[in-house]
Image (tube, rainbow, N blue to C red):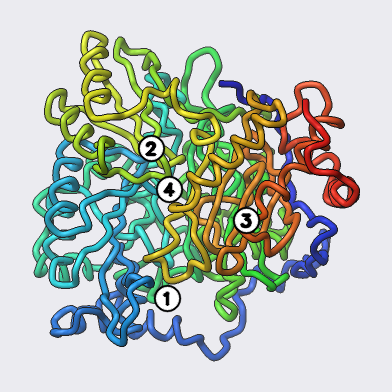
Amino acid sequence: MKFSAVATASVLFCGVASAFVQPSLLPRVKNGSSLSMVLEKPKQKKLQKIEVLKIDSDHLIHPLKEQLQTEEIGVSKDAYQILKYHGSYQQSNREIRGKVKDFQFMLRLKQPAGELPPDLYRLLDDLSAKHGQGDLRATTRQCFQIHGILKGSLKTVISSIMNIGSSTVGACGDVSRNVMTTPAPFNTPSYNYAREYSKVFAHLFRPMTPAFSEIWLDGEKAASVETWAKEVEHHNVDEAMLHDSGRGIILPDSTEPIYGDRYLPRKFKIGVTVPGDNSIDIYTNDIGVVVIANDETGELEGFNLMVGGGMGRSHNKESTFARAADHLGFVPKEDIMEVMKSILAAQRDHGNRDVRANARMKYLVHTLGIDNFKSLVESYFGKPIQPWKEIEEWKYNDWMGWWDQGDGKLFYGQHVDNGRVKDEGDFKLKSAMRSLVDKYNLSSIISPTQSIVFRDIDPKDKEGVEAILKEHGIKPIEEVDPLNRLSMACPALPLCGLAQTEAERIMPSYLDRIRVVLDKMNLSDEEILIRMTGCPNGCARPYMAELAFVGDGPKSYQVWLGGSPVLTRTAWPFMAKMNVDDLEATLEPILAMFIQQRQQFEAFGDFCHRVGGDAIEAYKSSYVLGSVKA
């Protein structure tokens, strides 16, 4: 399977194509202008309702605690907003019509670095069977979700997860979410540092409120400390968290010294990787962290940081947009926790709390420009941030198939279509995972592409692992179509309340149809990174893909083109309101132009980025279907 080595060292927000009006992006602060407007905290305005709710919740306790004790099958709107911080979303099946909604709950775990110990998988397997809808779903941020939990079972499920040394705390809500890292469990200094510091940052930015133990554990401590907290004890993370430099990072809030009683303006995402490995979509994070180790000794020197990435946008709101992160600079290892705190504090104090659609840190970075945002961060940190260190070009790899870990053990990446771990007909992935865990006590890692990596496999067990997968109807990676392997889709209908159309359920048929078009045009060997979402919020990171379908109405999608095959720039919208029946007629002219005008070894996304929407639209207007083949 080929992966393009093309990359760009500096990633900027891409303009849109001719089919759309150029967005009037938020105004930037000009370089060299006074930063007094930035370094002073914004003047207090009337608080938005969500901000008042956070304050009145007494650090995420009320009204959730009271609502969980009612006989209703759901919780109130205010309680639902607080419930998100506890890792759960209230949902209903939108395909079941009736005056009374069949409320159920999706629960998302917090799994820094995507790590899934064997005991945790056994528990989730059992909980999903007993209290959920029977399956598990791997997310694009390397954690599992359990769907179909009833309100009366929430406490049992969450307390069980907490007592085994895992958590759902901060998996949702206006806090730092699950910290991602490359899923490849190589035993090398850089990869070990990436895993280690993803857990450091997860622990550093964990919510400190006692709400979670009070509501789910009746005020008692969990039976087991979070596994990642134990692993990073030697970093003295609590001491670093509470260190007060006197520069405004630490708030006068004894419960939440980092977050305060209003927490963050919106969700906050962190990803950690090593130079060259962009398996995690590093540029889509609020903070992207790149390990910098000494080439000769392997000793950790520090980290390159990038800031201001994010996917979410809204249709017909030009002030909202997807954005790839900017390079901020290099930070020595001894300063990393304080700089991370400084960045989070900058967003906490200066992020847009008045307009929630513009509350992510990407809008703050875009508005200020990277130089002024850097000055803002330095005002909290107290020292200049060093220049970005040059690193090797980014490559994309999903780490599927068999690999040597580098310590005498093997790891195996198992592709999972759209992250759905289930037993259905002859396909029994959920049972296969349980068999592997029970027989070999395997740990695993959830990948950023919603798949599973089994790690620490003894070479003598390789045939046994393959046999169990085969017995359960699981295809080896060599038999998975590259289009499927490179694709992602969000859950969308029927449970997601934001979905405007299908994604996960229709994506397999879309890929089959695209495969037919490629084969017909003699492009069978072409590998295109394709993603789909049922709404514009971007959960499957569609705006980084070479080709993406973003739901904009019933059976209708925007088509996005021009993302990088190594995930270093945003795509642009080519057209809106593509009916599901028009897929082939829409793609064939673009592929025909690709055949006739591509440069040697040029990937599909790079081609679309180079020629642009105007040229593609002009070519399409005179194209005759069926007239071009490679």
Q: Amino acid at mark 1?
A: Arg
Q: Amino acid at mark 4?
A: Arg
Which quadrant of the structure image shows residue 364?
Answer: bottom right
C-alpha distance separating marks 1 and 4: 24 Å
Residue pictured at 29% horizontal, 70% vertical: 255
Report crowding for label 4: few under 14, some 14 to 19, many 20 or more residues within 10 A (C-alpha). many
Q: Which residue position holds label 4?
A: 141
Query: Which corner quadrant holds the N terminus?
Result: top right
Q: Amino acid at mark 3?
A: Asp
Q: Position of residue 183 (x, y in %)?
A: 41, 32
Mark 4 falls on what kind of element?
A: loop
C-alpha distance separating marks 4 and 3: 31 Å
Q: Which residue position holds label 1?
A: 262
Which of disc 4 and disc 1 is earlier in sequence?
A: 4
Mark 3 falls on what kind of element?
A: helix
Look at the picture and state if 221 lies above or below 510: below
103 left or right of 358? left
Which of disc 3 and disc 1 is earlier in sequence?
A: 1
Q: Which residue position holds label 3?
A: 581
Query: Which corner quadrant holds the C terminus?
Result: top right
Q: Which residue position holds label 2?
A: 416
C-alpha distance separating marks 1 and 3: 46 Å
